[in-house]
Image (tube, helix red, strand yellow):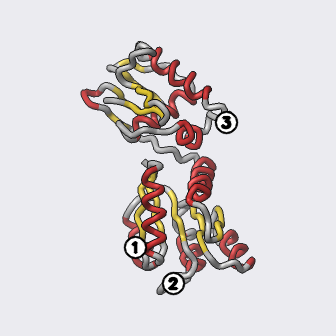
Amino acid sequence: MIKIIMIEDDEELAEILSEFLNHNNIEVVNYTDSLEAIKALKKNQFDLMLLDLTLPNMDGLEVCKQITTYNNIPIIISSARSDTQDKIDALEYGADDYLPKPYDPKELLARINSVLRRYNIIPTQSMTGNSNMFIIDKDSMNVFFKGKRLELTRAEFEIISLLMSKPGFIFSRENIAEYCNSITSKDFKSIDVIIGRLRNKICEDNKNPKYILSVRGRGYKINI
């Protein structure tokens, strides 16, 4: 699961964004104080930073400038400040994107996914299902089912890894297309085809699957 650190002193906005992103399989940890956030970043691992500019104790531009000297975390600036120089400075200091407020949370999600794809960050890791049914090794890009290594295409690997990142969670076709670099078509039927191939490779009946389940009108989940 993707984990984001957000530095936003508008607590109401932070709560709205956190709830929306969490529904899209992104965990958000928010700090209203920039100094506390910097401390947390040194102690914990995050996949991306969402950074406001107008903050107590330290301006967001200074936060961006300081963090990029020792951490290569992707940074998206989220600010109501419309000064062109702020945008230029933020990008020169190492920010990856600048999103002016106000904005639709869906646009924020799209930009987050875009930045994560550029950094080749997808929510995969070494993961083991109940009774070792599925084992996924991110480093070697191998997937084992009941102890047998599966021969998978990159798209198949990305989809099974995404599903395994949160067993039982329903991923929409939009979620899958956003997270999987190998899926470039907006025709979501290609995802259905890949799911079918995955089921065949673990000897599942496409009409009565046991592990990779479709939820009508919503998407797919893995049952382990």
Q: Is residue 195 visible?
A: yes
Q: CA distance from mark 2 to mark 1?
A: 13 Å
Specify the farthest residue to the front: 217
Q: CA distance from mark 3 to mark 1?
A: 41 Å
Quadrant for residue 149, please give it: top left
Q: Is residue 41 visible?
A: no
Q: Residues within 10 Å of mark 3 (few under 14, many from 20)?
A: few
**Label 1: which residue?**
39
Q: Are marks 2 and 1 in contact (CB under 8 Å)?
A: no
Q: Amino acid at mark 3?
A: Lys
Query: Quick one: SS at disc 3?
Result: loop
Is 66 located above or below residue 155 in the figure? below
Q: CA distance from mark 3 to mark 2?
A: 42 Å
Point 61% across, 26% down: residue: 190
- Quarter placement of the C terminus: top left
Q: Nearer the viewer, residue 65 or 205?
A: 205
Mark in front: 2 vs 1 = 2
Q: Name the N-terminal-most of marks 3 and 1.
A: 1
Where residue 138 sits in the image (x, y, percent)? 45, 37
Q: Residues within 10 Å of mark 2 (few under 14, many from 20)?
A: few
Where residue 31 sits in the image (x, y, percent)? 42, 73
Point 47% across, 67% down: residue: 6
Mark in front: 3 vs 1 = 3
Q: Are marks 3 and 1 in contact (CB under 8 Å)?
A: no
**Label 2: which residue?**
58
Query: Quick one: SS at disc 1?
Result: helix
Q: Name the N-terminal-most of marks 2 and 1.
A: 1
The numbered disc on residue 186 is 3
Specify the farthest residue to the bottom: 57
Is 170 located above or below residue 110 in the figure? above
Quadrant for residue 112, please give it: bottom right
Point 53% across, 42% down: residue: 175
